[in-house]
Amino acid sequence: MKSIAITLMALIFSNAVLADAEKDIDYRKATFKIVGGHMKSMGTILKGRMHQSDLKLHADGIRAMSTIVPKVFPEGSGDGKTGALPAIWEKPAEFKIVLNKFVAAANEMAEAADSGDMNAIGPAIKKLGGSCKGCHDNFRASD
Ligand code: HEC
């Protein structure tokens, strides 16, 4: 009897943990969808040379999102339907480096967009795009 109770407790507990992981994964994916949306919009603006006055809004958007991104990788949120690789939690020092590079690049992009200077905007968006790849290459599963 006692062991059944313990088994049940363990089951309920592990389901609760999994449910939390799913919510964390959903929120992480939603966060990166927004980051990706802003990035795509900026690329479209720069390629098409239109809606240029919106560039700053998208750059500010990514800068704002870059304050959320470090918080969407809680311990245990690697279990489930996620492209987040175990390396995120296994190599925290390396992960922090790519995370910091992204945050710095997002800030630089926002400053460049603020200045409106195309000579600053070009390199800044390249650097920002490179920082996405810098993380995806080692910490995100390729589909
Ligand atoms: C520090 C690491 C890191 C950085 C920096 C990063 N990403 Fe990601 N990205 C991830 C991980 C991990 C996932 C997988 C999330 C999951 O499936 O739980 C992801 C997923 C995504 C997704 C898919 C979201 C979905 O619909 O499931 C998009 C789009 C994306 N990233 C775009 C970007 C762009 C654009 C940048 C740069 C401006 C960027 N990411 C920077 C780690 C990063």
Image: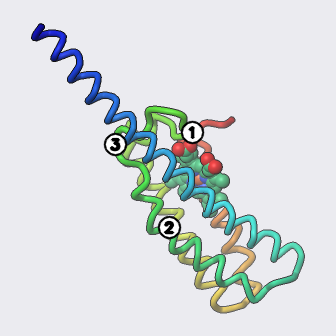
Q: In which quarter of the image is the N terminus?
A: top left
Q: Is 81 drawn above or below residue 103 in the view shown?
A: above
Find out whether the residues at labels 2 and 1 contact each other: C-beta distance under 8 Å: no
Q: Does the residue labelled 3 lie within 8 Å of ligand 1?
A: no
Q: Which mark is on residue 135?
A: none
Q: In which quarter of the image is the C terminus?
A: top right
* Colouring used for the render: rainbow
Q: Where is residue 31 in the image (x, y as percent from the top left)?
A: 54, 58
Would you place residue 98 above or below residue 139 in this image? below
Counting residues from the start of the chain, the first of labels 3 and 1 encountered is: 3
- Badge 3 local density, few (<14 within 10 Å), some, or many (20+)? few
Amino acid marked by disc 3:
Glu
Q: Is mark 1 within 8 Å of ligand 1?
A: yes
- Crowd class of label 2 (few under 14; some 14 to 19; many from 20; radius 10 Å): many
**Mark 2: amino acid:** Ser
Disc number placed over residue 83 in the picture, else none = 1
Q: Name the residue under label 3.
A: 75
Q: Residue 66 carries which label?
A: 2
Distance (Cα) linking label 3 and label 2: 19 Å
Q: What residue type is labelled 1?
A: Gly
Q: Residue furthest right?
A: 48
Of callouts 3 and 2, the N-terminal one: 2
N-term mark: 2 or 1: 2
Please give the name of the residue rendered at 64% of the width and 82% of the height, measured from the top-left corner: 57
At 51% from the left and 62% from the top, the residue drawn is 101
Q: In this view, which residue lies farthest toward the left? A: 2
How many labels, in total? 3
